[in-house]
Amino acid sequence: MNHEKVADRVIEYVGKDNLVAAAHCATRLRLVVKDEKKIDQKGLDNDDDVKGTFSINGQYQIIIGPGDVDKVYDFLIQKTGLKSVTPDDLKNLAANGKKSNPIMAFVKVLSDIFVPLIPALVAGGLLMALNNVLTSPNLFGTLSVVQTYPGLKGVAELINLLASAPFAFMPVLIGFSATKRFGGNPYLGAAIGMAMVMPALVNGYDVANVMAAGKMTYWNVFGIKVAQAGYQGQVLPVLVVAYILANIEKWLHKHMPATLDFIFTPLIAVIVTGLLTFIGVGPIMRIISDGLTNGIVWLYNTTGFVGTAIFGTFYSPIVVTGLHQSFPAIETQLLTNIAKTGGDFFFPIASMANAAQGAACLAIFFISKDEKQKGLASSAGLSALLGITEPAIFGVNLKLRYPFICAMIASGIACIFIGIFHVLSSALGAAGIIGFISFPPKYYLPFFISIAISIALGFILTYVYGMKFDKVTTTKKAPQNDDKIIAVADEMVAAPVNGELIKLSDVNDQVFSAEIMGKGAAVKPTDGKVYAVADGVLTVAYETKHAYGIKTTDGAEVLIHLGIDTVNLKGKYFTTNVKQGDKVKKGDLLGTFDIEQIKDAGYDPTVMIVITNTMSYGDVDELNKDTVKAGDDIVALTELTPNYSAAANI
C-alpha cells in the first residue's frame, strides 16, 4: 500500500475543506466532517485500499487496516494541516455544538437497562415454550406429552417453575439493572424490587380483581391508607422507583458525613424510596403502565394485518436509527402480562424483517462478481437469517440501497400473514428462522408460512432487480503474482487468551462482525494475559496497548484487538512487554489487560483475532470449540487453489 497516495485519495473523496478533525484507532480513520453528503461515497467504495466505511455518533469512519492506518493518518494530518487529536477528543468534538437527541438518549437508557436482562428473559421464555410443547394437546397426538407419559409431569412442573421465575420477579431484575444504570447501588435496587413482589402483598396479577371486589387490605401510614398491592408483571413502576432510589442515594453520599455514610445512606434511601413507592409512585405508575399496555394491545387489535404490514415494512429502517433498542422494554411488559395481552407481536415482525434482509443479502452473493462483496454477503446473509442483521444491513444492503428496499417490501407482505393469523410469541429469542421456538406450538405453521414468504420475496425481488439493472458487476481478481496463484502454506492460528470462543459475527462491533477486516474468531477472556498466536514479527504495537499485529513466518497477517473501542482508554488498564519490530514465538507474553476495570469503564473486553489478509487464502475457518486456552488452535488457514482462482474470476 502506498500510504501517501491513499491519504491523497481519502482527502479527495472526503474533501479537504470538509474535514474538521481526524483521529485513528487500530484499524480505522475516524473523521469529523462538516457535511457527510459532500463525501464521494462511490469513490471510497471502489477504492481497493479502503475496506469499508460507516458513520456513527457524529464520526465518519474509514477502515484502512492495522499497520497501515497510522501511516495514512500521518500523511492526512500533514497534507490537511489538521490538529492531531485522540479518539476520545474526537468523540467530544463530534458531540460539541450538536443538540442532543432526547429520544435517542431515552432509548439508550432503556437499552442499557434491558439488554443485560435479555439472557434471563430468553431462558425463561424458551423454557416456557418447552413447557408448552410438553403440555399442549393435539401437537403430537390427541393427548399432550405429559398426558401420554405421566412420569414427565414433575419435569414439566419444574420447567414451568423455572420459566415463570424471571417474569414473576421481574421487578428484582429491573431494580438491579436500572439502579446500576442510574448510578446507584444495584443491590439496593434489587432489595426495593424484592419488596415490591413480597408474598405478603396481593399478587400484582390479581390487584385489579381484588380492588373491584373490595377486598384489598391496607396499611395505615401516618393516617394514609396504603394498599398492600404487589407489582408482579410491572415494568414502568420499578423503573421510576429505581431512578428515585439512585438519586436519593447519590444525594445522601454527597451530604452525609463519611463516618455515617456507610450505615445511614442505604437505610434512609431504602426507607424513603419504599414509602414513596407504596404511597404514591407505585400506584400512579401502575395506572400509567396498564394504560400503555392496554393502548398497545388495542392498537394491535384494531389495526390488524394493516398495522403489522406497516410495522413490518419499516422495522428495518427503525433498526438503522437504533430506536429498536427501546422495544425490549415494551416486549417485557407484554410478556409479563401474557394472560391479558396474549403475547408479544414485536418478535414475529422482527423475525420477518430480519429474514427478509438476510435473503436479500444472499441474493447479492449470487449477483455480485466482486470477491470481497460475495464473501461478505454470504456470511452476513446467513447471520441475518439467524437474527443478527447488522452485518447484512450495514455491510451490504444499505450500501446498495435496493436490497434494503426489496427486503422492506418482502417483510411488509410477510407481516400481513402475521397479522391475519395473530401470531404472538411467548418469549424473546433469536428473531429469525429459528425464532419458532419462542412461539406456542399453535403458531408454528403460520410462522413458517410467513417466514418462507419473507425469505422467498426478499431473495427474488433483490435478484430480479439486481440482474435486470446490473447493479453489482465489479470484478476483482484473487491475489496473483506473475499471473500465478500466490501459494500460502496451510497454517493454524492460536488463541491469544484464555476464555470462551465465539464467532466473529457475534461481536458487538459492525466492522469486526461483518468481517470487513477479514475472517477470524473472537474470545470472551477469563483472564488478562495476552500471548503471541504464532511465530512471527510484531508489525503493530500501538502506544494505547490495545492491539497487536503479527506477520507470521508462514505469511498470515493477524490482528489481535483487545476489547471494543478500548482505544479511548489511552492505554489505561493495559501493559505491554513488546514493541513493533520484535520477533515473537508462539506463546510469548505480549502484555496484560485488566478485564474488570475495562468492564467497569463501560467497555466490552472481547478479544478479536482477525486474519487481515484473508483474501490470500482459500479458506479461513474457525474451529468448533467452546472454551479455549491461550495457545489452543482456533483458526485454520487453507492455501489458495487453482479451482478457487477460477471460481473467483467467473
Image: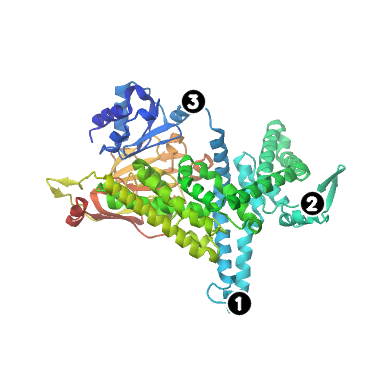
Q: Which residue is mark 2?
A: 228
- Specify the amino acid type for callout 1: Gln
Spatial separation of the CA atoms under disc 2 and disc 3: 49 Å
Residue picked out by circle 3: 96
Vertical order, 422 against 482 (above or below): below
The one nearer the camera, 524 or 587, is: 524
The spot of residue 554 in percent (x, y) is 23, 50
Disc 2 secondary structure class: loop
Q: Position of residue 214 (x, y in %)?
A: 83, 54
- The residue labelled by disc 1 is 147
Which residue corresponds to the image point at 57% horizontal and 77% vertical from the top-left?
A: 142
The mark closer to the camera, 3 or 1, is 1
Residue 441 in sight in this render: yes
Residue ranking furthest to the right: 223
> Which one is earlier in the sequence, the residue at label 3 or at label 1?
3
Pointer 3: residues within 10 angstroms few (<14), some, or many (20+)? Answer: few
Task: Measure how far apart labels 1 and 2 are at the Cα level.
Answer: 39 Å
Secondary structure of the residue carrying tag 3 is loop
